[in-house]
Image (spheres, helix red, strand yellow):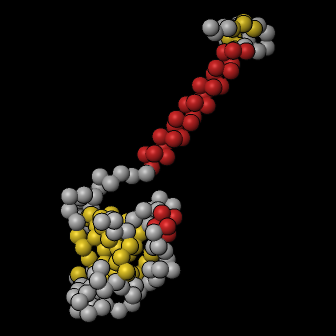
Amino acid sequence: MLRTRFVSGPHAGPMGSTSVMTGYAWRRSVVNGLALFLVAALSTAVSAHHSFAMYDMTATKTMTGKLTRFIPGSNHAQLIFEVIGPDGKPVMNEGKPLVWGVETGSAAAMARQGVTVDSFPQGTILTVSLHPLRDGRPFGAIGGALINCGTTLPAGGCNEKTGKSFLAPAN
């Protein structure tokens, strides 16, 4: 029940009286306002975190490259690499090395699985399976194993037999 009382005098509105909330109505208004604020804040945080709809989860690419940058992040970490061919030389695209990136879980989750800036320093040869972006840009979401092969491409390529595998599902 909303209780009001009418006031006249200097605090009155243009009609000569104003409604002033008392006790229960005031507390209810404050609680409703706080609830509205929390719902808005939480929905903003949830909508700020993207879904994986931008990735083609039906396609998987496996690529080998030389790590150029490891970007740790609270929501997702990213590994940026220059794609290399079976001969260990960079794959070229319009006169420049072809650069791809892969998004992983959070840096904290990755660290629990052994993937850190220290375990994957710049220059590391890696092989990664990823789900590419639907729009064709050279980026994807982790879609399988991440293999670290050190700083030189092993004979036979960078694979589970020649490198250390991370993030592979347990068989």
39 left or right of 149 in image:
right
Q: Quadrant of residue 145?
A: bottom left
Q: Where on the picture, by quarter, is residue 169?
A: bottom left
The x, y position of residue 127, in whole percent, is 31, 78
Furthest residue toward front:
171
Residue under the point 20% across and 62% down: 59
Tell me where residue 29 sits by quadrant. top right
Left or right: residue 125 versus residue 61 is right
> Residue drawn at (76%, 15%), measured in percent from left and top?
11
Nearer to me, 16 or 2: 2
Q: Residue at x 37, y 68 (%)?
A: 167
Above or below residue 70? Residue 39 is: above
- Relative to 126, does residue 40 appear above or below in the rendering? above
* Foreground residue among 165 and 8: 165
**37 shown above or below 51:** above
102 displayed left or right of 48: left
Point out residue 83 in the picture as x, y percentages from the top left corner: 28, 81
What is the tally of numbered marks visible in this picture? 0
Instruction: Name which residue lies at 59% across and 25% down.
Output: 32
Q: Residue 43: in sight, yes or no? A: yes
Residue nearer the viewer, 64 or 15? 64
The x and y percentages for residue 53 are: 29, 52
Quadrant of the drawing holding the C terminus: bottom left
Figure check: 20 above or below 119: above
Determine if residue 81 is in view: no
Q: Position of residue 104 (x, y in %)?
A: 39, 65
- Of the 4 image quadrants, the one containing the N terminus is top right
